[in-house]
Amino acid sequence: MKPFEISNMIIDDDFYNEEYVTADFSYQNHDYSITFKKADLEVVNAWVFKDGTSLPANLSEDMVELIKEDVQKRI
């Protein structure tokens, strides 16, 4: 069982001729958003949403790898 659940995923292909994938997910009772370059799934940014604001997310490398695997399957 995965420790997170992806609730939404967007593929943006209109940003300066590059494609990006943004996945919104829940993990440990918080909502997160992470954006990857679609070509190689390099992390562009990650945010956690707390108390009505967004803050840079501090996700472990293991967690990012699990999310990448799930995103890759969905693309």
Image (tube, rainbow, N blue to C red):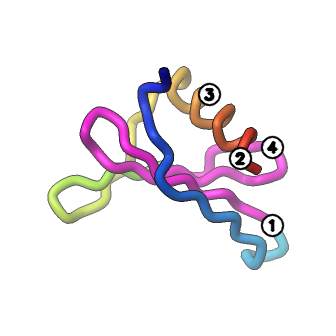
Q: Report the Cα–Cα distance between label 2 and label 3.
A: 14 Å
> Mark 4 Cα within 10 Å, few/some/many (few <14, many 20+)?
few
Q: Nearer the viewer, mark 1 or mark 3?
A: 3
Q: Residue at x 36, y 36 (%)?
A: 27
N-term-proximal mark, 4 vs 2:
4
Where is residue 1? Give x, y as percent: 48, 21
Q: CA distance from mark 3 to mark 4?
A: 12 Å
Mark 2 vs 1, N-terminal side: 1
Q: Is residue 18 shown left or right of residue 25?
A: right
Residues at badges 2 and 1 in contact (C-beta under 8 Å)? Answer: no
The residue mark sitting in front, 4 or 2, is 2
Label 2 sits on what residue type?
Arg
Q: Is residue 50 left or right of residue 40?
A: left
Residue 65 shows which numbered tag?
3
Q: Which residues are magenta?
A: 19-45
Q: Which mark is residue 3?
A: none
Depth-wise, is mark 2 or mark 3 nearer the camera?
2
| Alpha carbon separation for disc pair 1 and 3 | 22 Å
Q: Amino acid at mark 3?
A: Glu
